[in-house]
Amino acid sequence: MAAPRIIVVGGGLAGLAAVIKIAEAGGTVDLFSIVPVKRSHSVCAQGGINAAKNLKGEGDTTAQHFDDTIYGGDFLANQTPVKAMCEAAPAIIDLLDRMGVPFNRTPEGLLDFRRFGGTLYHRTAFAGATTGQQLLYALDEQVRRYESEGKVKKYEGWEFLSAVIDAKGVARGITALDLRTMELRAFPADAIILATGGNGAIFGKSTNSVVCTGSAQSAVFQQGVYYANGEFIQVHPTCIPGEDKLRLMSESARGEGGRVWVPRNAGEKRPVKQIPDTDRWYFLEEWYPKYGNLVPRDVATRAIHKVVYEYGLGLDGQPMVYLDLTHIDRATLDRKLGGILEIYEKFVGVDPHDEPMKIFPGMHYTMGGIWVDFNQMTNIPGIFAAGECEYQYHGANRLGANSLVSCIYGGFQAGPNALTYAKNLAAPEGDGGAAAEVLRQAEINKNLLKNEGTENPFKLWRELGQTMTEHATVIRYNKGLKQADEKIVELLERFKKVNLSDRSQWANTSFAFTRQLKNMLELSRTIALGALLRDESRGAHYKPDFPDRNDERFLKTTKASFTGAPEGPRIEYEDVDIQFIKPRPRSYTATK
Amino acid sequence: MATKTVAIEIKRQASPDAPAVWESFELPWRPGMNVISAMMEIAANPVTADGRDTTPITYDSNCLEEICGSCAMRINGKARMACSSLIDNLEQPIRIEPLSKFPLVRDLQVDRSVLFENLKAVKAWVPVDGTYDLGSGPRVFPQQQEANYPLSNCISCCCCMEVCPQFNEDTGFVGAATIAQVKLFNNHPTGKVFKEERLRALAGDGGIQECGFAQNCVEVCPKQLPLTEAISDVSRDVLIQKAKDFLRG
């Protein structure tokens, strides 16, 4: 039997981690990515990667990391995989270190660690404030090595369109579109791994990169894969509002001592540096004395929201608060936070060494995602998922610096598991359904190109983003969520009249975007409806009308399945694995 | 009151063989606007300044925070990242063209895969034994980390290659970005095992001796990599390597 052939879709940390494991085990990989893999969204991660290495004499343990992660996620994450991830994390850091990631060091030449939100330990290894970039490059370099040895073939500039599924419901490959020539093709495989990131584009402006549309997740969802916990969306407390996107201002700014405050008086007229300490309100430190500015993201985000909208204390009446680093000396800031301060200065034109930054919460991370089992496989045999596109490691709220570790760990699991699965797979009958799937995709393309409507896809997208941001982010009401779902249904209807201003068959980016838009619309219903049905508050999901967590009804994973019917996806619930840590109330006003 | 607008001219080309044409756009101004948000505005309203329907612009972009390296283009004659190019800091009409030294795909999109091929040729990686748990990595002192980290910030945007007078088909010069990576990996305690191979890869035609020390690279680099320093360090190492290889016969 020929060596199994695995397809990995997505070249961020999770995808590359899977590729490396498969190539190392002797498998061959076809790696698909919309962008050259070195330009994947993982480069945007800033602050660091968590692992309980306990190099600061604090007595940190992997059990503590496990507990912080489960507690931070408000007990919604299945505990078995999270426990395994936390136990594997220290060795992952060592591996990255061996691969040459330029982690910051202690004077003795050991790895340095800093604090991050939702923990009281120094557990976050970091490379300046560009840790994601450095980690991605390290894996990219290892994959380039395998590529030069012929074990990996890259298809950069190809977009995944769908899975090829045979008559028995088993995945047999993918269809993909060459974004230059617009050629549509099927690629056979014995197993496929999706590592396609988050879905920030559904919210219009977010901290996510342009490619983070959730399109691939939505495509397989529409083919029968479950989508889990869609309603759990992380809004990062500190972003730089922008015209084109919301730029992340890393939690590491607070990890290194940054303080969040607003002037105590609405309509404060003095220049910021002349406002004395007594007239500044450090509301996080006041409300959460133990964790202070390092409460988890959902908690910090709601606090900022409250100060701005309930107390009316936004800066100059605008939805913004200060994030202040000016009390820390310049050399320390440059050594530990250089990259992000430079970004702020470049995009805002103010030097954060001298003046407090103005920040506001913005959509940041997709906790929910493709449903997978503990082997990272979906309910369709042969389709695996890893990284932000799946749902498994963060529960109702992700702790800062846990994303990088979950991506790499998830990829490290998915790769070998896919290989094992593929080795035991019987050969397909005929082409495994490839020709039929290509035909189905070709039909979609043809209809889109000849459509004579009046709707501009980019305008439809703006409307989607506005309604999702308004109704399905920080504060959620059932009335608003119903409106959001109705709006999505309206947009789906208007999508039928979409008009491509560009009908050419060469590097047609509007065509590719419009295909993604349809998938965004379908997936956004799982977010709106999942949130509508979950009448409780848990982690990032907050309903003022149901302010408490309700374990009896909702200590459950939401599982959405596609129906194609007007009433939208079918929602069912699955029990959460809580065998190691008994759920307890979550509060950061004191030590947990 | 007339609303404030932004005047932009974009050089367009439907395919590598199609003729290039300039199109003008008049867009509503908004505070904090960058070149990317201007492109987004055109995509939502694809109409030229003289009211003619056109198509959205094809260009590469991804992170929009100057860390993925995608959106390099020539803006008012200068190679730079579109995301960090704020409209208010640019003289109008803003003239936008694709990078000129790379094969054109469409409009502002070019093919920069040459850099990734160069990185393969110089083995720009640390050859680890495997991904299984082998304990901690080599000790690295903060001084060494602080020297290497800036080199590891290269975002592969290729601006340094675009502005280099020596980067062209005649010389086949690899360009500054690749040379900086050679320095980075030769500095690494494990990566330096390939030091000789990397230096030899830079010793021949198109190698480091093609550099004419114009120093444009270091001026244009959006991440302020110490490129000229890297070139002179690696140059010296290549010469030493050549001498060694000569003596060895």
Image (cartoon, coloured by chain):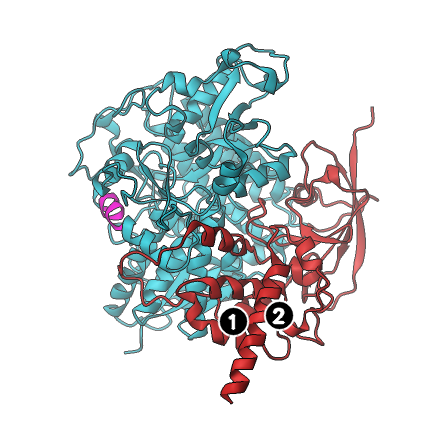
Chain colours: A cyan, B red
Q: Is residue B97 magenta?
A: no
Front-most of residues A350 and B232: B232
Mark 1 surroundings: few (<14), some (14-19) or many (≥20) residues within 10 A: many
Disc 1 marks a residue whose amino acid type is: Val
The residue under the point 30% across, 43% down is A393
Position of B135 with respect to B163 (left or right) is left
**x, y percent for residue A511:** 60, 53
Verify CB contact (< 8 Å) between mark 2 and mark 1. Answer: yes
Q: Is residue B52 above or below residue A554?
A: below
Position of A168 with respect to B206 (left or right) is left
The residue under the point 58% across, 58% down is B156
Q: How many marks?
A: 2
Residue B113 appears in view: no
The quarter of the rendered structure image containing the N terminus of chain B is top right
Residue identified by numbered label 1:
B122
Labels 2 and 1 positioned on one and the same chain: yes
Position of B83 with respect to A221 (left or right) is right
Q: Is residue A310 above or below residue A240?
A: above
Q: Earlier in the sequence, mark 2 or mark 1?
A: 1
| Letter of the chain that mark 2 sits on in the rendering | B
Residue identified by numbered label 2:
B174
**x, y percent for residue A153:** 45, 70
Region rendered in magenta: A81-88
**x, y percent for residue A216:** 44, 52
Front-most of residues A381 and A54: A54
